[in-house]
Amino acid sequence: MGLTLLATTYTAYAQDSAAVARGKAKFDHSCAPCHGKGAGDDGRESLPGTYSLKIKYGETLPAALEDRTDLTSEVISVFVRMGAWSMPPFRKTELSDAEIDDIAAYFAVSSRAGN
Amino acid sequence: MAVLPPNTSEADFNNALQAFAAAVGDEWVFSSDEDLKPFRDHYSPVPLEEDELLASAAVAPANVEEVQAVVKVANQYLIPLYPISTGKNFAYGGPAPNVRGSVVLDLKRMDRIIEVNEERNFALVEPGVSYMDLYTYIQERGLKVWLDCPDPGWGSPVGNTLDRGIGYTLGFYRDHNAAQYGLEAVLANGDVIRTGMGALPGSDTWQEYKYGFGPDPAGMFSQGNYGIVTKMGIRLMPQPAHYRNGLVTVPLREDLGPLVNSINYLNDLNMIGDPWYGSPLRALLDNADFRAAATRRGGGIAEELNRFAREANLHSWQVELQFYGSERTTEANWEYAQEVISDRIPGARFTAGESLAIPLTPEQLHETTGPYSSNMRRNITQGVPGLGIWKNLGRTQSLPDTWAQGHLGLFAVLPRSAESIFEAQQVFADTMADLNLDGGINALSLGVNWYQYAFLFSAGFSTGGGNADNSPAGKKKIADGLKALLVVAGEHGWGEYRAAPYFQDAVSEQYSFNDYSLRRFNETIKDAVDPNGILAPGRGGIWPGKSRG
Ligand SMILES: Cc1cc2nc3c(=O)[nH]c(=O)nc-3n(C[C@H](O)[C@H](O)[C@H](O)COP(=O)(O)OP(=O)(O)OC[C@H]3O[C@@H](n4cnc5c(N)ncnc54)[C@H](O)[C@@H]3O)c2cc1C
């Protein structure tokens, strides 16, 4: 009984960290070119997504998505499937629902580590 | 489901969806409102919602056989298919079709990089491969070949080329349709063809001799609707050893003529990369007197504008030059460029830019503090894809609650001469004033030289500004204005190089030589190869017989 519980927890953890790794890879591939923390590629202080969110939220929320603790899978879905202002929406062929879950799992970890 | 394909009953449509699912698998057929939202054109110029170019469904095949199966179903139910590759054609329609109710054929899942050859400098890719993916592939393997990227790097060599997209390095590579070398397409009857040497079984030169024997139809797939492209070869630039840039300024308004001629000379000898024109006098546009002179009806007056330039101690025009080669050849080419230009323009001034070994370090890629302030975005001069350009669309400090909608404008093809620029400045500025539109055209507006042998003159509402009015009335005013502008441009012999579906008929309308003989020829081919008119009807202004009436 105890062993089974341990095994289940371990599996959940292993799945989790796999999801986080997948989420990071997908974020780096599809989101970071606009939402990364680095400088804009032509002298701007930040990349376009980070830059816009800094204007949108000022000091109330972090500008970088990776530092946000409020971005659950559901919240991300709303923005990426509808589009958000200058961000066009993503189709399921380029970003699956499972990949959105992975990105949310990654944010849950990156927002902890980052702060 | 909100929209049905034209002339299709709900029952037939449901049967078609089932047949599509049998072809590609349930999970790759999308027909719920929610799934279809991202297939809308997020930057749609279409004023009224009831006219919006919405898809009725989307189908995403994984390989050529599945594409063939989908085509078969579309023929059976007479449903129009609209193929996209990466579907990022923002400012030119996004992933949305020409005909409301079409089924979008989303090829994103076909994303194999079949070959990158660094000795013979080419790549062969499927439609779903993005510039960023191809760049990563090349970097991970340390291959010594370069891409020529459009500004947004998430699009694809296949999709971008098929809309005659452009980039920013050397002339041949900037013209993506020219650098297309051999393609494979599924036709409306399900047949698969390969162009050029691809038609010769066992040949190893598909990406090296694009013509094969007889007519080469490859170009007909660009801005056309004759097939679904499933593979494409592109020429790659061998990685040069060195990059150098330099700034040229000339004092007088009338110096633009000899400046353009000098640049044409250097450009057509392949001694320079993308030349980037501008005017230092833009700095004066905040001055009301100068602005009045620069926006004067009838066009700018040289004497008057020269006086402003002299008083402000500014030159009238500038061009930034890029050089690729070795350290010594780029230096020699820069010196030669100075010789060619000063021979023709006595007062020309030259400022050496940077001289950098390739590949640039990440710091050098971001560096913007050169000897002069450059308008060239560094990463695209180096074939490095990114999305930094999205800065032109989003919120800005001064306009925190609004955003620009990409190019709601168009690019007219002009001769590479100062006379044509001066004429276009006057014609477009005055026409827009008549239409009560502010398109930002004035006596300082210039062409871009993306295509080596022509200027493209942005005749409308380019990115930036954050002033797009997205209300239906605001969009209608701009859309109507652009259509009126197209007609005026056509009267001067200027046509557009590319357009969103909403404007394609209006653009095509200007290409009327001999009672539209070219369009009639295209229609004849369309009817022969796609008798049911199922492939992207209307794209490029080509409609199948049944829609022409
Ligand atoms: C800020 C901004 C900057 C831009 N800068 C540039 C630039 O520098 N250069 C440039 O060229 N563009 C530019 N664009 C326009 C556009 O974003 C790019 O051209 C982009 O690469 C096109 O999207 P895509 O590659 O995903 O092509 P897709 O959207 O996949 O394809 C474009 C069209 O080609 C046809 N098509 C695609 N695939 C197929 C197929 N397999 N078979 C048959 N027909 C097909 C379809 O009609 C489709 O709609 C810019 C846009 C914006 C908003």
Image (cartoon, coloured by chain):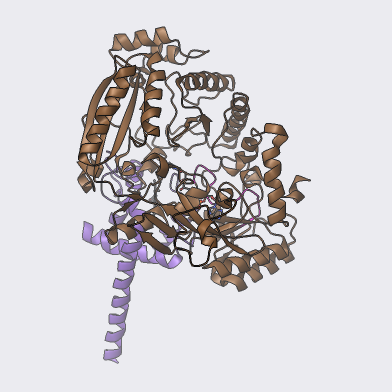
Instruction: State the residue lying farthest toward the front.
Output: B213
Residue B114 versus residue B172 in the image, above or below: below
Across and down, in percent, residue B105 comes to 57, 59
The purple-coloured chain is labelled A
For the N terminus of chain B, give its image quadrant. Answer: bottom right
* x 39%, y 12%: residue: B290
* x 24%, y 48%: residue: B359
Side of B472 relative to B113 (left or right): right
Instruction: State the residue lying farthest toward the right.
Output: B549
Q: Which residues are magenta?
A: B90-103
Across and down, in percent, residue A20 comes to 31, 67
Residue B176 versus residue B80 in the image, above or below: above
Across and down, in percent, residue B219 comes to 55, 48
Q: Would residue B34 be visible to someone looking at this image? A: no
Side of B278 relative to B360 (left or right): right
Rendered image quadrant of residue B492? top right
Residue B100 among those drawn in magenta: yes
The brown-coloured chain is labelled B
Rendered image quadrant of residue B56? bottom right
**Towards the viewer: B367 or B53:** B367
Residue B387 among those drawn in magenta: no
Rendered image quadrant of residue B366? top left
Q: Main secondary structure of the magenta part?
A: loop
